[in-house]
Amino acid sequence: MFSAKVYKENYKITEFNNMVNIADGELFISVGNVEGAVARNAEYTAIVRNAIGNGVGGVLVEFYVIDDGFSVYVGKATTDANGIAVLNAEIPQIYGENPQVSAEINNPEYYESTSAYASLTAYWLTDTVMSVNSKVYAEGVLAVLKDKSGNILLPLSIFDKL
């Protein structure tokens, strides 16, 4: 409640009472695209700004991967003084064709909750086997890179100098 008394010499004192409702402020969040291998760490980044465009520090941002209609929690990070939150975390297993990254701010003090989305490009790593020739050549040791089924992955041989 807001109260004020208005007075002027030789006039009646008038008192005002007013109920004031202060609404939570609005935050704007943007999240960067993420690219990396499934089951490997990648960098998740979000930027949080207030209504006048300044970065807001100390805001907890939670990151999720949205895949095939399901939401998988990745982790959380707190924004720095410039409003930037960075999380290095594993990319979960992906099933759908168009996974997304979500950055969410839930119930921050003095602000409304908000979220943003970006694309996730995730790829699978191939299990590999390297067979090394026992002979040593002038260029080094000869090695061939193959997948787990024995198929040669590169059309050339690999020389590694000793």
Image (cartoon, rainbow, N blue to C red):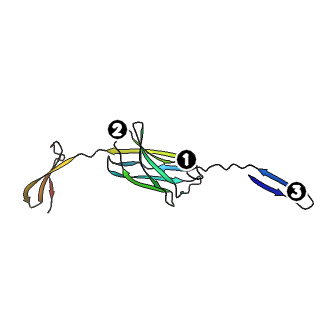
Residue that lies at the very extreme toward the right in this rendered image: 10
The image's mark for residue 13 is: 3
Disc 2 marks a residue whose amino acid type is Tyr
In front of the other: label 3 or label 2? 3
State how far apart marks 3 and 2 are (Cα): 72 Å
Element marked by disc 2: loop
Where does label 2 land, which residue?
95
Where does label 1 land, which residue?
113
How busy is the neighbourhood of tag 2: few (under 14 within 10 Å), some, or many (20 plus)?
A: few
| Circle nearer the N terminus (3, 1) | 3
Q: Is residue 38 left or right of residue 64?
A: left
Residue situated in front as seen by the camera: 139 or 94:
94
Disc 1 marks a residue whose amino acid type is Ser
Element marked by disc 3: loop
Disc 3 marks a residue whose amino acid type is Ile
Residue at 54% of width from left, 54% of height from top? 49
x%, y% of residue 85?
46, 55
The image's mark for residue 11 is: none
